[in-house]
Structures are given as structure tokens and as C-alpha cells.
Image: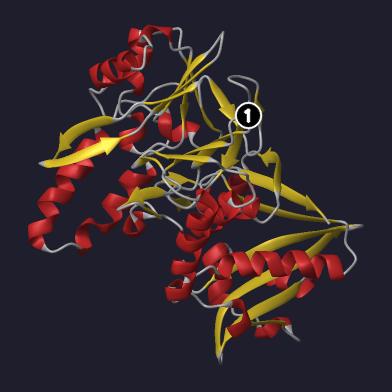
Amino acid sequence: MNNCHLLEISFDYNGQKQVITPVILQDENETILVDCGYPDFVTFLKDAAFSKGVNLDSITKIIITHHDMDHIGSLAALKREYPQIEIISYEFEAPYIEGVEKSLRLQQAESTLDELPGEEKENARQFIHFLKSIEPAKVDRTVSDNEELPWCGGIKILHTPGHMPGHISLYLPASKTLIAGDAVVIETGKLEIANPQFTFDMEAALSSVQLLLDYDIKNLICYHGGLFQGNVKEALIELVHSYRSKSSSVKEKAMQIRQLDNHKQAPLDLLLLADPSQQLVEEYIKRGKCFAAYSGENVVGVYVLLPTRPDTIELVNVAVAVDHQGKGIGKQLVNHAVRQAQLLGFKTIEVGTGNSSVAQLALYQKCGFRITGVDKDFFIRHYTEEIFENGMQVVDMIRLSQDL
């Protein structure tokens, strides 16, 4: 790891000692910083870089793994001080980093505020105020999953959602090094999921850890914990196993997914969770194929496939009962739909979702779909009432497809 410098920064935060580990990558032409700490961390970064023989004014690029406050807090300040820096992020993270969309962490904090007991609300309000104070910064370049960047011996972008929907990790094949970001952290010498109580999608987080097993990783660098000491592959397997074994998720073998004989049997209440237009739902369930997921006698999920063109079928609706969400059922339904489309002889399966549906976009891509386009103003043209999700109006349809 000659071209890879770990910047171990120790500091006090809310009366507790913390350590973060941004990373600097170098070659003859580029000096790249990966993540940049909390607000007012420029001096910390300068000192840590100098200790590694690097002047911070030589930085050419900053790659952001996700938009949590301890990863982007000093981004705007760095850009002001060093305007030559090119800021790079995953494509779906850019609106949050730039402040165009409200931070997902802020949305999460605001949505749970009323549920907290009185003594905790004041701390939560202070945290919300802090999140609102994070200064946005313009993203100069966006990257996508599996994109390979040519600098520092090669950097492969890995979309590792879960902790946040747009989270990425970086794989450096030349040194077999993984910069994990918050995909995993080190606690008492073991790999763990970062802040599981605040993880947006635990099933996606575990799938991301599983994805890392596809790579030959000799050096694993965690933002919280630094360089992992031990057998990386064994530690990743142990992490997945520990969560899977204690998980209360509905397992696929315990859940039956079967096609409904009559569209009148379709669970309209579930379908309306994903599509608020009852008129549209009733129209496409008559023409499509509706599949329901059962846990015992209870319907816990549903999806609808609708042939749209020769050789093409669309997944027009997928929904999971509210009290069963976050258990991996959505992913099972999507994968089941893909298999059904194959069995039915179609060559392409398509799906569309709203511009605000960050978690759904991550799910579909984890299931093999790729973005093919944007149908602008779709939800304005086809829906009489405005739809809001994640604190923003749903306006455009993001189209994705998968070759079968």
C-alpha cells in the first residue's frame, strides 16, 4: 500500500474520544482524499497528511463515500481553500451533498423526533440543528457502480448500500485494498455493521458485505477502525453469518410466493402503498399477472408483471406490508419477478420508480437492473394529485431494465 496513506484523526466529540480514518491515495499525477471528516476538520486533515509526508494543498480530488456529516463536514471548506480540487461522488449521492435534496440522515432524525421520550428530544433537536448546519458543496463528477477510475493504479467503484442507499466503497486491485467507508467498521478487533440502529436497510447492508466476498481483499480499511488486522475473508463471512443467524427476517423458504388466479384476489391495500392511483392499479392488475407473498395465511407482499412490448415485460408494482418492511421481502419479490419473466420467455424486464425513491433505486440495481433513462414529469402527467416522498415531490420516473 505504498500509494495509500491512512490519516488517523483522534478527537473529542460530545465528550467522547473518537477516531476516524480518511485515506489519501497518490500517484505521479494525482493526490486523492477519500472522505474529509466533520466540519472544521481542515486543520486536523492538514496535520494528519503532513505526518505522512503529504501537503494538503497537493490534493487534486476528493472522493466521498456517502453524505453523512462525518464524511462531508469539511468538504465545502476544503473546496474554498483549494479550489482546484475535483469533488467526486456516487451519482445518487450528489443531490444530497449539493444540498439540492434534504439529507437522508436529517429526514431520519426528524421522522423519529416525536417518538422520543422528553429527556431525549433536546439532544435530538441539537443533532437536527447540527445536520442542518452542514454546508453543501458542488459535486464536479459523479461515478456509477463498477466504474473503474484510472488513477493511483486503478480504483473500482463498488455500490455498497445499506448504511445509506448511495454508499460506495473503493477497491484498489493493484494492492488488493478495500476502502470500506462505513460498509463495515471495526469494533474490539472484529468487523461489524456501522450503527445498525441507524442503518437504512439492514438486508442491503448484509448483501453489500456479501458482495465484498467476491473480491480478493488483502487490506481492509474502515473509516471507523482503520486497517483491519486479521483474515479479511473469514471476518466478512463471520459478520454475515452472525447477523443472518440471529435475524428475525422472513426467510424465503418460510415464505411462499404464488400467482393469483383472479385479479379480484389482488391485495389492493398493499398495491396502493406503491402506487396511490387506485384507477391505474385496477387497470393494470386486470391486464397483468399478480403474485402474492404469503407468510402462513397472511399476505406480506405483492408484485405485478405486465407485458408491454414483444419480448418485454414490466414490473409495474411491488409492495411489502408495512409491518414486514426491512426484512428483505422486497428483494425476494424482485428476484422472484425476474425469474418469472425468464420462465415466461421474455428477453427484457423493465421497472420504473420515482425520482425520490432512493431505497428502491438501490434495491433494483442490487437485483441486476440498470438505469436506462428518465421519463420527465411522468407523475405530473399521469397522476391528478401531487405525490411526496422523502420530503420531496415525486415528479420524474427513473426507468431501469435488465436483459434476461
Residue name at image x 25 percent, y 26 percent: 39
Residue name at image x 60 percent, y 30 percent: 143
Say whether residue 139 is left or right of residue 400: left
Give the x, y percent position of residue 10: 22, 32
Rendered view: 310 above or below 245: above
Give the x, y percent position of residue 99: 39, 30
Rendered view: 343 above or below 374: below
Is 334 or 23 nearer to us in this picture? 23
Say whether residue 378 is left or right of residue 83: right
Is 54 or 58 nearer to us in this picture? 54
- Residue holding disc 1: 174
Is 346 or 13 nearer to us in this picture? 13
Is 152 or 273 nearer to us in this picture? 152
Which residue extends farthest left?
Answer: 119
- Residue 65 in view: yes
Q: Amino acid at mark 1?
A: Ala
Which residue extends farthest bottom?
Answer: 297
